[in-house]
Amino acid sequence: MPRTALLQLGPMMSLIERQIEEAFEVHRMHEARDRDALLASVGPRIEAIATNGHFMKADEVLLSKLPKLRIISNFGVGYDSVDTAAAIARKIIATNTPDVLNEEVADTALGLLLMTVRELGKAENYLRAGHWATQGDYRLTPLTLRERKVGIVGLGRIGKAIARRCEAFGMGVVYYGRSKQAGVTYNYYSDLAAMARDTGTLIVITPGGAATRNLIDAKVLAALGPRGVLINVARGTVVDEAALIAALRNKTIAAAGLDVFWNEPKIDPELMTLDNLVLLPHVGSGSVYTRDGMGQLVVDNLKAFLAKKPPLTPVPETPFKSW
Ligand code: 8YV
């Protein structure tokens, strides 16, 4: 029996590549010399997509060339590269990789907060440069987590894991989101600038996409104030990067830590010139343990489709009804 045809968008970890190779007839968009020719020849047979979420968008233009497509299995909890409206219109199920990465991304968020506030990366560089022995102790950091309250932007599953850690560190927690959540004891803000003003510390972990583009704008940054700290482990698009660069350069906020950027991996070179900014190369979920869990979920959703079983983790916009 011929295998079900799958289109792979972008290179993926060997755990995924090996298993989809065993189960599907795989066509790799990123290896095609002529993508249009590949789509013209196999597009009508493609029933599944596996996407790394970065290589290219699964948008209306692509989906319109794949009339038999039923599932888009996305590596990552964020699925902003999938046009869910186009998927809904075509009765295509999109799946993502939630939950298995919650604790890892929350760990990274707290690590980035500590690096930013207590200058841990800079302190290590100071030691490695030999300055400790020749110039004396590293400076006392002007910022501290003590007496700090954190405002979490997007109290989803990862946001809650971050909130638990913040509490364990002795920090107060409040949150901003589209609506107040039942059963959550943290104070809710419907006004993001007000939360920035009252806390001076934002950790951003809201989904990307059009709804949150430039949510952290000049007004919110101004509200953070001169001791203000911004941490972003969500998507680069959530922060107005030009406004952030200006705020850091003019010291209208104290410091920021970013794991995500508008242009990855070729980030705005201006960001590199700011010494009150900590930069990480999108490593939020980046341990072998957690990426293996995410990768297996990509495969298991695809295998569920092959077995005509419900997908494990459909995204809320495309709930499973039937294949
Ligand atoms: C992914 C992420 O690992 O899950 C997400 O949405 O941002 C990361 O954890 C990354 O997108 C994969 O390259």
Image (cartoon, grey):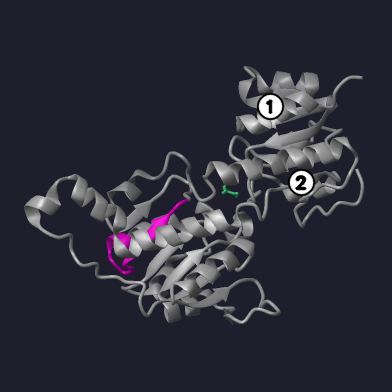
Quadrant (top left, top right, bottom left, bottom right) of the N terminus: top right
- Mark 2 surroundings within 10 Å by alpha-carbon count, few (fewer than 14), some (14 through 19), many (20 or more): many
Q: Is residue 290 left or right of residue 140?
A: right
Residue that extends furthest to the left in the rendered view of this protein: 134
Q: Which residue occupies 10% across, 51% down?
A: 133
* Dot 1 or dot 2, earlier in sequence: 1
Q: Which residue occupies 43% across, 54% down?
A: 258
Q: Which residue occupies 61% across, 71% down?
A: 177
Query: Which residue type carries mark 2?
Result: Ala
Q: Is residue 128 above or below residue 47?
A: below
- Mark 1 surroundings within 10 Å by alpha-carbon count, few (fewer than 14), some (14 through 19), many (20 or more): few
Which residue position is annotated with label 1? 18
Which percent across, then down, holds residue 161? 57, 65
Quadrant (top left, top right, bottom left, bottom right) of the C terminus: top right
Q: Is residue 189 above or below residue 252?
A: below
The segment highlighted magenta reads 247-259
Which residue position is annotated with label 2? 94
Q: Are marks 1 and 2 in contact (CB under 8 Å)?
A: no
